[in-house]
Structures are given as C-alpha cells and as structure tokens.
Image (cartoon, rainbow, N blue to C red):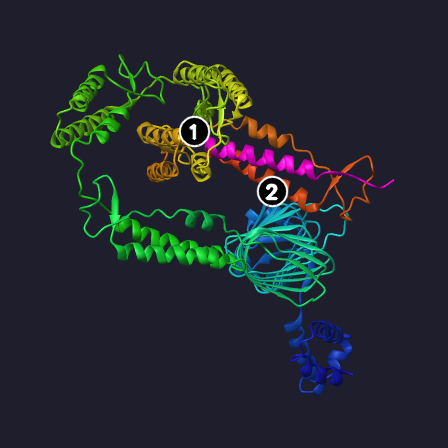
C-alpha cells in the first residue's frame, strides 16, 4: 500500500486538478500517521523508510496548514483557537496590532513551522465597520498565499498582495473599499439571494487592471484606474460602473441595465433578454452573440457639437486690415478657409446619424483646436473713423464707483470694496474731462484717443486703490444678488399690444414699474451692509412674488410682420449673466464673474437687439445686423468670464438639504407592469427609482462639498426638483387585487 502511494505521489506533483491534489495530499498525510513499532521496524535504508521520507516531503509541500480563529494579536504573537504562534518577519505587517480590530474573530488557514506562522493561505475578515467608521485592514505589502474573503460591511482593504481571489460575500451589503491591492485572480462578488436588494458601493483605488466577476446584482463600482475585465453573470439585473472598462461581458438570465459613466472599449452580450446599455458611458464597440437578446444601445450626445457649429465666430476677411475698423478683427482668406474646413468637417459629423460618441468627441476637439488657431490669427484693423466717440462714451458709461469710507474701511462690510473720497474725486475729475471731449463737436480723433488713454489710466488707479472693508456681517446675499441679476423685462405696449409684434411678450408701463420698484428695493437691501439674514430672506420672497406677478401679466402682441425674428429672439433668450464683482476676491472659486462694465456692455447690446425685435417695422436687414451685433457682444462677454478667488465663501444649502429630506420613494414593480403591487399603492420601474436616487446622490455631493458655489447649489436644487417631478409623473397605481 505504501509503494502504491509513493508511485502516485510522483504523479500528484504534476496534477493541476486542485480537488484531486488536495485529496491525494490528504491521503499521503494519512499514511504518515503510523504505529511507532511499525516505523521502527524498518531500517534506515529500507524501501519502506525511503517511501515515508518522500511522502512526508510531498505532504509538507502540499499542505494548506491549519484552520484557526484569530482571538487576538500582540506585537510578536497571534492568539488563536489552536493556541498562540509567533509571526515570521514577512507576515508581521499583516498581523500588525493596527489590524487588531479587523482580525478579531477572523478565520485563517495558516502554515506553522517551529511554532511560527510562515504563510497565510486563506483569510476571512468578519469584523464589520459602520458608515461613519470603517474597519481598516492594512497588509503592509505582505502576501496572502491564497484567497482573501471579506464577510462584513464597511471594510477597507489596503496594501496587500492576494495570490488568488478577493471574494466579497453576500454579508457585505452597504460598502467596501479596496485600496492599492494586488490581486492574482479576480474580485468576485457573491450573489445576494433576497427579494429586496440595496445597492452595494464598491470603491477601487490604485488597483491596476483589476478583473471583476460579478454574480451579485446592484453593485456600483467606482475606480480611479481602468478596469480590464468585468464578467456579469447569472441573475444580475443591474450594474453601475463609474470608470473606464476595457471589456464588459454580459451573460445573464433575464433583463439587465447598465448605469454609470466612463469609457468602455468593448461590450459583449452573450446572453440576456432586454439589455439596456443606454447609460452615460462612451462605448466603442458592442458585440451581441445572443441573437434573441433585445439590446438598447447608448445614444450619442451631439448637443455640444451642434451648438459649436451652429454659428461659427467668423470675422472679416482682409488683405492687410486697412479696410477694417480698428475696433474690429480680421484674418486673411487662407486663415478663414482653414477654419471653414474645420467647421465643415464638424458639421458632417453632427449631421451623421450613425456617428459614434468617440467620433463626436474627436470632432469637438478638432473644432476647438482649429478655433484656437483661427482666433490667434485674428488682428485688429487699421481703419480709423474720424471723430468716433463711441468707445470713449462706452468707457464713461462703464464707470462703477464703490463705497467711500471715512474710517479706513471699518465702516464698510467685509465683502464691500471702498476708496477714500479723494480717490473717488480723482476719477470723477477724469470722467468730467472725458465727457467734455465727448460733448465737444470739434474734438479730433487725436483728442478722443488721448482722452480714452487718460480715462483708462484713471480707472486703473482707482481700481488699484480699492480695498475691502473690515466690518463683519453674517448676511449671505448671494441668492438675492443672483435673483436680481436674473430679472428680464419685456416690451412695454402703449396700445394694448397692437404696437407689439405677435411673437413678442409685453406688459404695461405700470406693470414694469412695479417690478422695477421691487428690484430697486432688493438692490437696496443687497447694498446695505447692516442688512440681517432675515431682511435678505424677506427681500428674496418679495422679489420672487413681484417676478411672478410680472410674468403672469405678460401677453403677446397683435401686430403682424413678415420679417423673421426667430433667430434674434432665440439669441436674446440664450443670454445668461454671471455674478458682478470688482476683482472676484469675495466670490467662491467655483463662481464665474465679470465686472459691471463688462456686464453693462452686454446689457446694452441685449437692449438694442430687443428694441429691434420689438419694433414691428424692423426690416430683415436691421434684424440681421442686430443679431450679428448681439452675437459679438455675447462672445466678448464670455471671453471676460473669470473665476472667484475666495475658496471658503459661505453658501446657504438649507433649501437643498430640505429638498433631499423630502424625497419619498414608492415600491418598485418586479414584474415591470404593476401586477405585483396592490391597487391602493403606487409603483415605478427600477430605472425610474434609480434615476431619482442618482439625482439625490448628486445633490448630496453638493451639500457635502464645502467649496460648492451658490450657482452649483441652485443648479442642484433645480435638477433635484425636476427629478422629483419626473419620478412622481412616472408613478402608477398597482393592479393587484
């Protein structure tokens, strides 16, 4: 019998079947447990003794060690259910006392030599953390010579090498983080066989090309590195991945939905019924092996590209610029032609219904490169219009004075700029001199140019003299200022709308005056450095009410005209103003701003365009000129956008938090048609619920972001409010009786 085992052992070494190898190793180990008399009966040189030595060597090489439960970890020893053992040098980082909590009651398979743990072939972590405090397991770059199994929630595994699999069991239901871990095989998520399954959030950090075997539904994986392969199998119905993926294979039993964003090189649908791939991912290639599967492909987003090529920002073509005004730009025909080619190429992609998202993104990139080159080639013309005072008058109109302080800024709020009276007087004097030149009908172009230079210098000196006050006030005015800036007036009719074009809204002068009065009152509160938060909140409420009354009073004119104003009106409606500031120091880094003069220039252009649009007698030529003038003003205004420089600007998020807390979910119909929901209850689809959950997550991230600007908070409120309305509209009554 011993010789038979010895011959078999030689073959066992080359066997790849683990189960058979384990069985044979067990059998070999069993043969080593011999009666003492039998062992002594054989001589040292006998075949029997030689067989035992070989059997022992192979058994030692094949052994997986002993399975223990870890009770405690000290500096030099591990206390287990089988006794205490010393720790080899290579495993000391693994059994560091900093891992004591994570290793408490962990199950491990260890190899022990001379009372010292030399290898860990299996390790199962069972200690759970909480949402506020995770359990950390830091391997210190040590190796587990087999599988690591995580069998508890809120665990963070980091800095460890796992020779085989990292297994996440069905006891992990909320979250797990895997950071800087080297995995020899795959990350496997075991199925959770319950009717109600919540999303499991998985965070992968600094893991190079991980492979994932997904047997569990509703897993959300985020990764800062590209995931090489994801295999979705079995009863999985939903998977969300926020990362780049090289290959995603879907082999499921029924319906499946993909969520998330990132770039996926290849998707292979091996099996499934209804497979929805219309997520936010950029998918390069889709291969469908199951001909019976109904696959919904992602829709390419062309909005940005379409907007870019809609109205290219062309300038005048000239040979040398002598025929172009000094206030206008020009390029050569060759430079214009090069840009036109880029525009044409981008439009071809925009008009191609079969264009992939990657082709669209490439077209956007190429267009932007061409636009940068085209804009760099633009030069100002050299043609002067004698006695042109428009630039000087525009500069005078752009002057914005700040508060005068009589106490070195101590009487001015900390977010309000100020100068001394003498500094303001110096600018006032320069403005007066400039205005004199404007009013002088005999002023030469040289006089005007000199006056522009002098006034510009005076403005620069005045701005450099501005400082912020030191008086502290806690009133947050960002929402009020944003509301004031959002006010837009419509045309005023003096003949019950008969003098206003049929496509133009109008009110009476008294209705406009009522809103203007409310705006003026709100601006007074915003400018009042002593205004309390209660004053500001009341002003917001009053102005909102005035805006609502004004909008409800608007009607469309009755005058008919044949000139097409649709493009001009669309351009006017597209205008969006940003915050006004002197130097951006009081604004969050996420807040976009311009100076008042830069805003006023656009306001003036909008007013001019609106007057042309409202004029029932405007010709098509006048409308086209107004369109070009406004488009140029918008481009100039956008080029002047700057980011704030205050990285800790307080923003009120209470409304957003209240909206998040108001969200209420209804049941999800597993059948997808409400037949499993009682008739007296509401239901939605899984996708509808998931869309709202995503909106709530995005809103919560804004709440948690201490650097979020007031605009981001406002956008989050609007987005979540819209998502809630869409979710409510998707709710239906159940049909189960």
Counting residues from the N terminus, which is met first, the one under dot 2 or under dot 1?
A: 1
Q: Of 647 and 149, which appears nearest the observer?
A: 647
Residue 129 in sight: no
Q: Read off the residue under disc 2.
A: 694
Residue 363 higher or lower than 514, as above or below: below
Q: What's drawn in magenta, residue-wise?
A: 709-737
| Residue occupying the far right of the picture | 737
Numbered tag placed on residue 183 in the rendering? none
Between marks 2 and 1 in the image, the one whose residue lies nearer the viewer? 1
Quarter-of-image position of residue 487: top left
Query: Residue at coordinates 71% horizontally, 83% vertically from top-left?
Result: 6
- Circle 1 residues within 10 Å: few <14, some 14–19, many ≥20: many
Question: At which x and y percent is residue 479?
Answer: 47, 25
Instruction: Examine the rendered structure and indicate whether residue 633 appears above or below residue 255.
Output: above
Q: Crowdedness of circle 2 by 10 Å Cα count: few (<14), some, many (20+)?
A: some
Quadrant of the rendered image containing residue 396: top left
Front residue (pair 39, 354) = 354
Magenta residue check for 195 = no
The residue indicated by pointer 1 is 614
- Find numbered disc 1 in the image and state the secondary structure of the residue it sits on: helix
Q: Quadrant of residue 53?
A: bottom right
Placement of the C terminus among the 4 image quadrants: top right
Left or right of 372? Residue 536 is right
């Amino acid at each position: 019998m011993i010789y038979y085992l010895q011959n078999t052992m030689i073959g066992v070494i080359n066997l790849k079947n683990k189960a058979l190898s384990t069985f044979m190793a067990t059998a070999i180990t069993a043969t080593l447990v011999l009666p003492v008399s039998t062992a002594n009966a054989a001589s040292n040189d006998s075949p029997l003794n030689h067989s035992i030595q070989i059997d022992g060597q192979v058994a030692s090489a094949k052994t997986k060690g002993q399975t223990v439960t870890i009770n405690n970890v000290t500096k030099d020893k591990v206390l287990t259910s089988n006794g205490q053992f010393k720790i080899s040098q290579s495993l000391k980082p693994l059994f560091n006392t900093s891992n004591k909590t994570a290793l408490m009651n962990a199950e491990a398979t260890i190899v022990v030599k001379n009372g010292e743990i030399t290898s860990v072939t299996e390790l199962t972590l069972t200690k759970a953390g909480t949402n506020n405090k995770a359990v950390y397991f830091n391997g210190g770059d040590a190796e587990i010579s087999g599988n690591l199994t995580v069998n508890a929630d809120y665990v963070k595994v980091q800095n460890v090498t796992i020779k085989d699999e990292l297994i996440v069991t069905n006891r992990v239901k909320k979250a797990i983080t895997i950071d800087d871990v080297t995995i020899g095989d795959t990350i496997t998520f075991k199925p959770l066989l319950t009717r109600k399954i919540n999303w499991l959030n998985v965070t992968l950090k600094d893991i190079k090309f991980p492979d994932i075997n997904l047997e569990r539904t509703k897993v959300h994986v985020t990764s800062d590195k590209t995931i090489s392969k994801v295999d979705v199998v079995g009863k999985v119905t939903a998977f969300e991945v926020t990362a780049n993926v090289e290959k995603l294979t879907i082999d499921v039993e029924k319906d499946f939905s993909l969520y998330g964003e990132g770039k996926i090189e290849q998707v292979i649908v091996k099996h499934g019924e209804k497979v929805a791939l219309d997520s936010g991912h950029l998918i390069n290639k889709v291969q469908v092996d199951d001909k019976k599967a109904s696959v919904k492909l992602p829709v390419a987003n062309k909005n940005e590209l379409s907007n870019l090529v809609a109205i290219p920002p062309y300038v005048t073509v000239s040979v040398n610029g002598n025929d172009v005004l000094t206030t206008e730009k020009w390029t050569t025909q060759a430079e214009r032609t090069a840009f036109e080619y880029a525009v044409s190429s981008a439009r071809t992609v925009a008009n191609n219904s079969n264009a992939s998202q990657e082709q669209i993104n490439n077209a956007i990139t190429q267009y932007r490169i061409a636009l940068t080159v085209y804009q760099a080639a633009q030069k100002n013309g050299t043609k002067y219009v004698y006695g042109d005072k428009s630039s000087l008058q525009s500069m005078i109109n752009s002057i914005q004075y700040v508060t005068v302080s009589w106490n070195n800024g101590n009487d001015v709020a900390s977010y309000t700029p100020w100068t001394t009276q003498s500094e303001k007087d110096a600018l006032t004097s320069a403005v007066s001199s400039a205005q004199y030149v404007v009013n002088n009908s005999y002023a030469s172009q040289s006089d005007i140019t000199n006056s522009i230079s002098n006034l510009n210098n005076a403005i620069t000196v005045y701005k450099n003299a501005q400082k912020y006050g030191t008086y502290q006030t806690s009133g947050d005015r960002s929402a009020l200022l944003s509301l004031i800036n959002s006010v837009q007036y419509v045309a005023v009719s003096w003949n019950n709308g008969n003098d206003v074009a049929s496509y133009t809204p109008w009110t009476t002068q008294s209705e406009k005056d009522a809103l203007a009065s409310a705006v003026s009152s709100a601006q007074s509160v915003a400018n009042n450095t002593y205004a309390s938060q209660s004053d500001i909140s009341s002003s917001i409420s009053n102005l909102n009410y005035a805006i609502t009354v004004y909008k409800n009073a608007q009607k469309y004119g009755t005058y008919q005209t044949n000139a097409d104003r649709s493009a001009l009106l669309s351009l006017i409606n597209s205008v969006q103003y940003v915050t006004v500031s002197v130097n951006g120091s009081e604004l969050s880094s996420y807040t976009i701003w311009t100076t008042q003069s830069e805003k006023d220039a656009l306001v003036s252009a909008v007013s001019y365009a609106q007057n042309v649009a409202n004029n029932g007698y405007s010709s098509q030529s006048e409308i086209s000129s107004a369109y070009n003038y406004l488009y140029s003003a918008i481009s100039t205004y956008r080029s002047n956008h700057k980011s704030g420089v205050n990285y800790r600007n307080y923003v009120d998020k209470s409304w957003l938090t209240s909206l998040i807390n108001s969200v209420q979910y209804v049941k999800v119909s597993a059948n997808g048609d409400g037949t499993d929901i009682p008739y007296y209850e509401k239901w939605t689809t899984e996708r509808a619920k998931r869309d709202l959950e995503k909106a709530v997550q995005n809103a919560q991230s804004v709440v948690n972001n201490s650097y979020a600007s007031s605009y981001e908070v406002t956008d989050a409120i609007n987005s979540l409010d819209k998502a809630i309305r869409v979710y409510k509209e998707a709710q239906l009554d159940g049909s189960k009786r």
